Every structure is written in structure tokens, then in C-alpha cells.
Amino acid sequence: MELNVDADLAARRIAVIQEHMDTEVTQEFDLTLATFDGHPLYEIVPTGQRFDGAEQVMAYYTLTRTAFPDQRHDNVRFHAAADSVIVEFDLLGTNLGDFYGLPPTGKAFRVPVIAVFFFTGDRITLERVYFDTASLLLQIGRPELLTAPR
């Protein structure tokens, strides 16, 4: 099967994702939200979480950046498809704040991530994230969250 990917559109989409990821790191979340098509939507596949709309997505940002204020990306690689861009990267951070009601451990994590960004034109409609939750929790010293009731 051959997929036709418009090179110009793919480049514009990758630039939008780069802005999205950069503003997540700098915690300029209004700019991050502006990379969406007007209705932000995140799915965190391993946990089954879905953040639908600006208010829920902003709550997700607040939760994760409270727990991991230095959260960032490394080794970012982009793969353009017809209706999406797949991004591989390492996610890094240090548990320096409360995480689901638990005090910080001060321990760092590094986990490989795949994020699939879906688009309408050159605006993001959905970010769907895949990563090994167990590795992250074990690295930050929170194995008890592996068996916590949902």
C-alpha cells in the first residue's frame, strides 16, 4: 500500500507539533492549546485517561507539571502519514511535586514514548500517547501505584 503524503503539509504539521512540544516544556500552555483545531483532546492510552476540551487538558498539564516541573523531550523523531504525524521521543522528568496525592520522591525518569498527532489541515485534533507506565512509576519510586485501584 502506498501512502501519499504532501511534503508541504507534512512540514507545516511537524512545525505545529514542534511548537506544541516546545511550549509544553516552557509551560506556555495557552500557546500549546492554540496548536489544536479549537478543541484540545488528549488520550493517554496506558492509563485509559481522556482529556476532552481546554479545561480538562489544562488540568492534565497542571497535574503533570506539578509532579514533574522539569518534564521535557529528548531524541525526537517525526514520521509523517497521510492524516497524522507519529512522534517518537524520550520523555524525561523528575518527581519534584505531589503526584496523585503522594509526596515527591525526587527521583528522575526517562521513558520512550510514541505520540500520534491527528490533524485536520495543519491543526491538531487529537494527541494519542503510548508509553510504559510501569517503567515510569518504578523509576520514580512509586511501585504502589501499579496496583492502586482505578
Image (tube, rainbow, N blue to C red):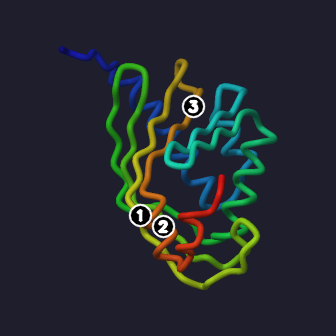
Report helix, strand or loop for mark 3.
strand
Question: Of callouts 2 and 1, which one flags the residue occurring earlier in the amino acid sequence?
Answer: 1
Q: Give the Cα distance between marks 2 and 1.
A: 6 Å
> Quadrant of residue 3 in the image?
top left
Residue of label 2:
136
Drawn side of residue 143 relative to residue 61, left or right? left
Identify the residue at image location x=51%, y=38%: 128
Residue of label 3:
126
Question: Of callouts 2 and 3, which one flags the residue occurring earlier in the amino acid sequence?
Answer: 3
Quadrant of the frame with the N terminus: top left
Q: Is residue 1 above or below residue 141?
A: above
CB under 8 Å between discs 2 and 1: yes
Drawn side of residue 122 relative to residue 32, left or right? left
Residue of label 1:
111
Amino acid carrying mark 2 in the image: Leu
Identify the residue at image location x=69%, y=59%: 27
Identify the residue at image location x=36%, y=49%: 88
Q: Is residue 45 above or below residue 106?
A: above
> Quadrant of residue 35 in the image?
top right
Report helix, strand or loop for mark 2.
helix
Q: Is residue 85 above or below residue 129?
A: above
